[in-house]
Image: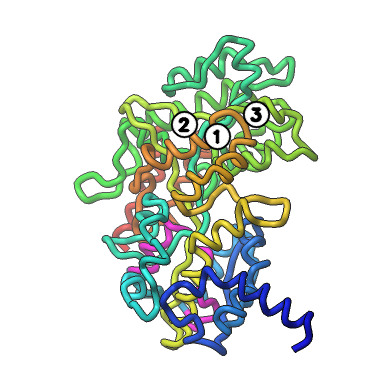
Amino acid sequence: MSPALLREARAQDADLALYRSAKIDWQQASGETLTVAVIPASYFENLITLAPQFKALTGIDLRFEKIPPAQIRQKCVIDLTSKTGTYSTHAADPMYYSLYAANKWVEPLDTYLKDKSLTDEAWFKFDDIIPAWRSADSVDGKLYGVPYDGEVTIQVYRKDLYDAKGLKPADTLEAYVANAAALNNPNDRIWGCALRGVAGAGQNMYIYPSIFREFGGEWMKGGKLTVNGSEAEAALAWYVDVMRKYAPAAAANWNWPDIADAFSQGTVANYIDAHSSASVVNNPEKSKVIGKVGYARWPKGPSGKRVTSIWNWGFPINAAQSDKRKKATWLFIQWATSAETQARTAHRFAGPTKRSGVNRASIWKDPEYVKLMNGFGANFVEATMQALEHDTDVDWRPRVPQWPAIGDTMATAIQSALSGQATVKAALDDAQRRIEPMMRG
């Protein structure tokens, strides 16, 4: 072997040494090819760059197909229903696991976790993965997906504007409104706040469920899915009121990138959305507010609760595959979600984009990672970790197989109220009428 090839082989061995310390045969599915569906996002792009390491470790080829978020759910459901097994695994929305499990489209993963030939429990340290995200990817106590990247919703605010007015980030929804009112100055192109308004199960129905739960709302009443009633009306009325009074008029049709962009340009004083949006408002090429940003947990609602989203992209195993390919898929999932790969795609990634949604509690305590994340602004890591540890609610949204249609129906109702096309009560009553046949079906 030439000296150059010898150096390359030694470098590869060093790269793979930590993985090879796991007491499993990584080569047991060598020769398989897996197609993995992901969204075009930096946290997956970072993973894709490591695919050659996975091939060297396992002998398994990876093919990644990048599908926009608006299409990936539908495309993967079509693949699962047709049982073609096109995608060995995919970036899965946790709200879809009830549908997947009810139809046995994906494999329960507990058997893979407990199989000593496939998983070295001491090496993988599954319990280190954020508990709330594990719960979100489970149905009736059974695990169906392993979280890869996730997020919580927190307050993002202009610390300089708050300090100038002697304000503190809101601890209650009532205080949130008061802060928005104090900072709202449209004549100077500064609005007090903004929340997602655009219709979509993953858009305004990403924010409203937290408000609903904070107002004491329960999705299931007497075994019946209920989206109207006094708590729902109070929650949606709060949402409509704060948006109409203190948000730009265009926010009724905004998604999170629109809000983060407006905040970056200095026109919004506060928003509540995914903690991962911090990377957008700290983009040195676009943001005018770097060094002026602070973070805080959700304000408490009348129920006394703070309720963040529970969101993650997890990886399930498509049940319509051969046993050998299922094993290959599990080896990929174990590799991608391991602490080592999480670190290599986050603070130890050589590229410019560092992940803020790693799945490991241990990494969130790593001083190197904490230092990097705190560069986003005041209280970022503390607010994110407190939300993850104290504010998560597995029933944040109704976890039923009919979710896709229910989410869309509720999103339309919310936007109709936000836009003034319907009263709060009429919008929610109409949604209830539309949803009841779905649940009977």
Q: Quadrant of the C terminus?
A: bottom left
Amino acid residing under circle 2: Arg
Q: Earlier in the sequence, mark 3 or mark 2?
A: 3
Asked if the magenta segment contains residue 91, the reply would be yes
Q: Nearer the viewer, mark 3 or mark 2?
A: 2
Q: Secondary structure at mark 1?
A: helix
Q: Where is residue 391 drawn, in percent x and y?
A: 38, 37
The residue sitting at 46% across, 59% down in the picture is 147
Q: Secondary structure at mark 3?
A: helix
* Magenta segment boundaries in residue numbering: 82-101
Amino acid residing under circle 3: Ala
Q: Where is residue 44 drawn, in percent x and y?
A: 62, 61
Q: Where is residue 357 drawn, in percent x and y?
A: 54, 50
Foreground pick, 416 / 367: 367
Side of 429 where 34 appears, left or right: right
> Circle 3 sits on which residue?
249
> Circle 2 sits on which residue?
297
C-alpha span from label 2 to label 1: 10 Å
The quarter holding residue 186 reads: top right
Q: Earlier in the sequence, mark 2 or mark 1?
A: 2
Amino acid residing under circle 1: Phe
Q: Secondary structure at mark 2?
A: loop
Q: Nearer the viewer, mark 2 or mark 1?
A: 1
The quarter holding residue 127 reads: bottom left
Q: What's the image's color scheme? A: rainbow
The residue sitting at 53% across, 39% down in the picture is 415
Is residue 191 visible in the rendered image? The answer is: yes
